[in-house]
Amino acid sequence: MTPSASPVTLAKPPIALSSACFVSSFDRFAVTPMLVLIAVDLNVSLATAVAVASGYFLAYGLSQPLWGVLSDRFGRLRVMRTALVGAALTGLASALMPELGTLVVARIVAGACFGAVIPTSLTYVGDTVAVAVRQRALSDLMGVMALATATATGIGGLLGDLTGWRVVFTVPALCALVCALALRGVPEPPRARIGGLGRHVGTVLRRPWALLVFALAFVEGAVLLGTMAFLATALQHQGISTAVAGLGTATYGIGVWLFSRLVMRLSRGWPVWLLITAGGAQMCAGYAIVAAQVSVATVTVSALVLGGGWSFMHSSLQTWATSVVPQARGTTVAFFAASLFVGGAASSWAAGPLAEDGSYPLLFGLAAAVAVPLTVVAALSRRRYGLLPAKGSLPAEGASGQPQ
């Protein structure tokens, strides 16, 4: 442990930490209903404007290992405060960019900075909340992020229609600066000493279970984060306003919030593999609905169901990630988040031409199809992992943290 830090034991995330997660989630999801506005304002095609989102997601993901190692070495909150200041500056710069190229660069840097917030917050929860109640604490944090998602896609879309996309980038930038100041009052938890960088990262990458969790996160990000960004553009392709499209997809955040409350209750009795199965089934059903027909009604229902899929599956996978290599938790969670958002970036980039052509039934149908093997592999793997403590195959925390 670090010599100067005293143990920190919490039952739920601090308010300042939750607020930072809210701002980070808002900034990440606010771009979705802005893509058409950016394309029109900067006189580029939608497929080209998608780079604003895919570049952000890619930087958000690729920066995770760096933030994880830094947080293990220098402290969770110090890293988060520094990143939030950087996010504030680059967020304000984004709002001032006159053409697409410089806007994409600014959003890439903003994504890299905001990328430190949520995984470092998850690691903080892993450091300070007991394993037995950790999934409930993470679900509580997910509920906050869900409200941010609903606000970003709903109110953000309305704000974009009324004031333009530049204001939508300015708001979270200013809030990030406030959060950086508020986090000064949050206690820093102790952390294990780490050796050389190569040895530390190698500790994570040599664990087969960790690599499996990262692979599952990559596919989950591709299925959900990357594809879901096109729900709003599918409506806008039909001539529906940005505000209405944003409000329709805002039910995703509502779904995450509602279903995360349910997951908190069910996690006390349901095995984790069953939670994953329920989440995967909802993801498949959500995309199947909108693949059959794109309308305000189907997108609204689909977004709600996809929120449930995220709540059930993702909370289970990220809880798994906090326990699979406990001695390098920050780095492990960072690689998990990197895999998730790189998967989302790759998916959004690959789907851009389909969206440009209006081939949304095919796009969403492919997402529904990929959700099936993702669910099967994730559920069966997590079930097998849960049986390992009886054979003495897991580290101490992992063994105590496997309720199933």
Image (cartoon, rainbow, N blue to C red):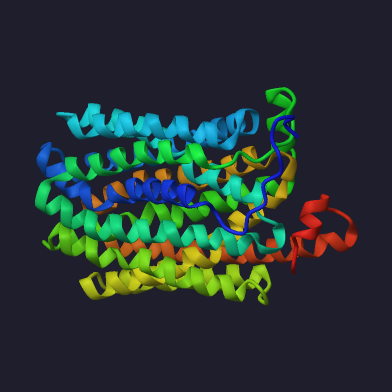
The extreme front residue here reads: 185
The extreme right residue here reads: 391
Identify the residue at horizontal 74%, vertical 29% (top origin).
3
Q: Position of residue 108 (x, y in %)?
A: 35, 32
Instruction: Work out whether residue 181 or residue 64 is closer to the camera in this orientation and state it.
Output: 181
Q: Is residue 373 visible?
A: no
Q: Is residue 28 left or right of 18 when viewed as pictured?
A: left
Instruction: Work out whether residue 159 or residue 336 is closer to the camera in this orientation and state it.
Output: 159
The extreme top residue here reads: 196
Q: Is residue 280 left or right of 293 when viewed as pictured?
A: right
Q: Is residue 247 left or right of 81 when viewed as pictured?
A: left
What is the count of numbered marks?
Answer: 0
Q: Is residue 313 visible?
A: yes
- Give residue 144's quadrant in the image: bottom left
Q: Position of residue 49 (x, y in %)?
A: 23, 41
Q: Quadrant of the N terminus?
A: top right
Q: Position of residue 68 (x, y in %)?
A: 58, 35
In the image, residue 337 above or below residue 372: above
Identify the residue at horizontal 19%, vertical 29% (top origin).
97
Q: Quadrant of the C terminus?
A: bottom right
Instruction: Work out whether residue 208 or residue 168 is closer to the camera in this orientation and state it.
Output: 168
Identify the residue at horizontal 50%, vertical 48% (top origin).
340
Q: Position of residue 148 (x, y in %)?
A: 36, 56
In the image, residue 271 above or below residue 74: below
Identify the residue at horizontal 68%, vertical 66% (top origin).
380
